Amino acid sequence: MAERIALIGGTGKEGKGLAFRWAQAGYDVVIGSRQVEKAQIAADELNQLLGNIKNPVTGLQNLQAADWCDIAVLTVPFAAHQAILTELKDCLNGKILIDVTVPLVPPKVTKVQFPPAGSAALEARDILGEGIQVVSAFQNISYERLMDEGDIECDVLVTGTSKDARKIVLALVEKAGMVGWDAGPIENSVVAEGMTSVLIGLNSQYGIHNAGIKITGINRE
Ligand SMILES: NC(=O)c1ccc[n+]([C@@H]2O[C@H](COP(=O)([O-])OP(=O)(O)OC[C@H]3O[C@@H](n4cnc5c(N)ncnc54)[C@H](OP(=O)(O)O)[C@@H]3O)[C@@H](O)[C@H]2O)c1
């Protein structure tokens, strides 16, 4: 468990939630932001919640965080996706990028709308090129679930540019208290990305915050 994890855009809801889970599990975690002061404030907030842990969370600018890490996790609104990946590309060479971005187009967030590349994850792959493994995960996990204690009642579909990279990310999913599935190549990320709009729609129809998905019929023992 040697991974150093940087949350790019980690001052936001989803990034902070994932940082909380991995810091709790003992990983070395950095929050990235466009402003280092904002990153440090978010890291301090998490450390208050986490209490006495082995590796307290720290805050850096996104570029420094991407440089420092083994695994970068991108949690920014889709409107920022292309620009931030282009900016971080050189720092990420030889590493894994986990893309959590959902290509939501406000205000119609309950309607599935994909970008010209086909999906957010495919756009990331096209921008980053062959030197960086892109894995897509966590699109169906709401930040509110991440900040609760205990296991999460929603599965994680993990797709990516290589089986080895997916395996590494599946271990991170498990350490964060979730059930993950190897859902195949990065092209399959459309399923999880599109599902988010469906879940947001169900949340709104039923007045809830926690609609989720479960794979059934497989005995994992
Ligand atoms: N929220 C959820 O429950 C959830 C669940 C699943 C997936 N997601 C996906 O995860 C991603 C992040 O969601 P979120 O709710 O955490 O978003 P958010 O809170 O709105 O934003 C996350 C962070 O992105 C950074 N950011 C915003 N605009 C930027 C820009 N133009 N350039 C660079 N950075 C920018 C900000 O960090 P700084 O200002 O510190 O730089 C912000 O704190 C989205 O793609 C979302 O669809 C969210």
Image (cartoon, rainbow, N blue to C red):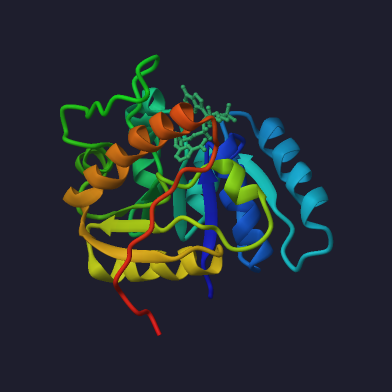
Corner quadrant of residue 10: top right
Q: Nearer the viewer, residue 16 or 219?
A: 219
Q: How many discs appear?
A: 0
In this rendering, is residue 162 above or below 79? below
The extreme top residue here reads: 107
> On screen, 18 above or below 165?
above
Residue 65 drawn at (x, y percent)? 54, 47
Relative depth, front residue between 56 and 119: 119
Seen at 35% across and 44% down, the residue is: 90
Horizontal side, residue 213 vs residue 52: left or right:
left
The residue that appears at 32% across and 30% down in the rendered structure is 103
Q: Position of residue 185 (x, y in %)?
A: 19, 58
Residue at position x 60%, y 60% in the image: 22
Side of 43 relative to 74 (left or right): right
Q: Position of residue 206 (x, y in %)?
A: 48, 32
Residue 31 visible from this viewpoint:
no
- 99 sits to left or right of 7: left
**Quick check: 203 left or right of 41?**
left
Q: Nearer the viewer, residue 207 or 148?
A: 207
The residue located at (44%, 66%) in the rendering is 179
Quarter of the image with the C terminus is: bottom left
| Residue 199 in view (yes/no) | yes
The image shows residue 26, relative to residue 58, as above or below, that is below
Q: Is residue 9 above or below residue 171?
A: above
* The furthest residue to the bottom: 221
